[in-house]
Image: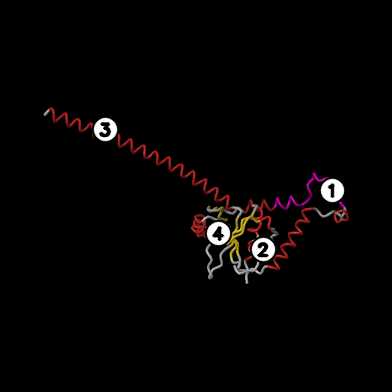
Amino acid sequence: TTLKQLLSEFKNEIKESINDHTKQITKNVKDMINELNGKIEVQQIKIDFLEREVRKRNILIHGINENSGSSLEECVISEIYKRMQVEINTGEIDFVRRVGQRNVNKTRPILVGLTTLQKKNQIMKNKSKLKDSNVYVTEDFPPEVIAKRKQIQPELIEARKNGKYAIIRYDKLIIKEFNKGNSGQIDRQKRNLSISPPSNIPSNVVGIPNSAKRNKPQDTKEVKTNVIVEQNRLLSNSCDLTK
């Protein structure tokens, strides 16, 4: 009996020891998994940030025929200048290429990388001038962001139907209530600011004769702008985009 009791106690001790070791191992594994998940999340945030930075100066131009005789870059410059009335030259374009596999039944969009965010914003601001044509411009978003934007599109439409200010910024929906009182106050402030020139402008500057202004030499920026305009005019004459 005593031997059986000792064996039973020994078995219980072994079971408790195994259970303790199992719990400790399980805890260690869970801690490692949590740590790895945390590192993965941090890396994913960094990847998303880098991808956003890479794409933020890109645009996608849809609807430009693939059979144009001119170079792709010339067609893009001509389209942006002629239809969107945005002055642009080759030095403001980083790269131009078609996206996707060639398909005889579908025109592939053109991915355009711009050198400055300012030029991209200027183009996006004027994209409404393409509404009467088959050409349109969109931003270059990652696939998951495009899916998210489509998902929240019904909420955007519903908010606007209810008279709210709603806009999608990247993959976030922003909804605000209109404040008529504040907007009216802002309008009044703008009108008041435009009544007279600032007091710190010298009187002799305000009273410059018109003849002196007319005789002012043409500055470098204006000369450069005229060159760009002439370049784009020549390109628009040589590139038929949407036949």
Residue to which mark 2 is pinned: 74
What are the residue bounds of the magenta stretch?
188-208
Question: In this picture, is 143 found above or below 33?
Answer: below
Q: Position of residue 118 (x, y in %)?
A: 66, 53
Mark 4 element type:
helix
Pointer 1 or 3: first along the chain: 3
Pointer 4 or 3: first along the chain: 3
- Residue at left offset 67%, top offset 51%: 186
**CA–CA distance in space, label 2 to label 1:** 44 Å
Is 205 inside the magenta-drawn segment?
yes
Q: Nearer the viewer, mark 4 or mark 2?
A: 2
Pointer 2 or 1: first along the chain: 2
Quarter occupied by the C terminus? bottom right
**CA–CA distance in space, label 4 to label 3:** 65 Å
Q: Between residues 72 and 121, which one lies in front from this camera angle?
A: 72
Is 32 inside the magenta-drawn segment?
no
- Residue at left offset 16%, top offset 28%: 6
- Residue at left offset 24%, top offset 34%: 15
Mark 2 element type:
helix
Q: Position of residue 38 (x, y in %)?
A: 45, 42
Q: Nearer the viewer, mark 1 or mark 4?
A: 1
Residue to which mark 4 is pinned: 160
Amino acid on which the number 1 mark rests in the picture: Val
Pointer 2 or 3: first along the chain: 3
Residue to which mark 3 is pinned: 17
Pointer 1 or 4: first along the chain: 4
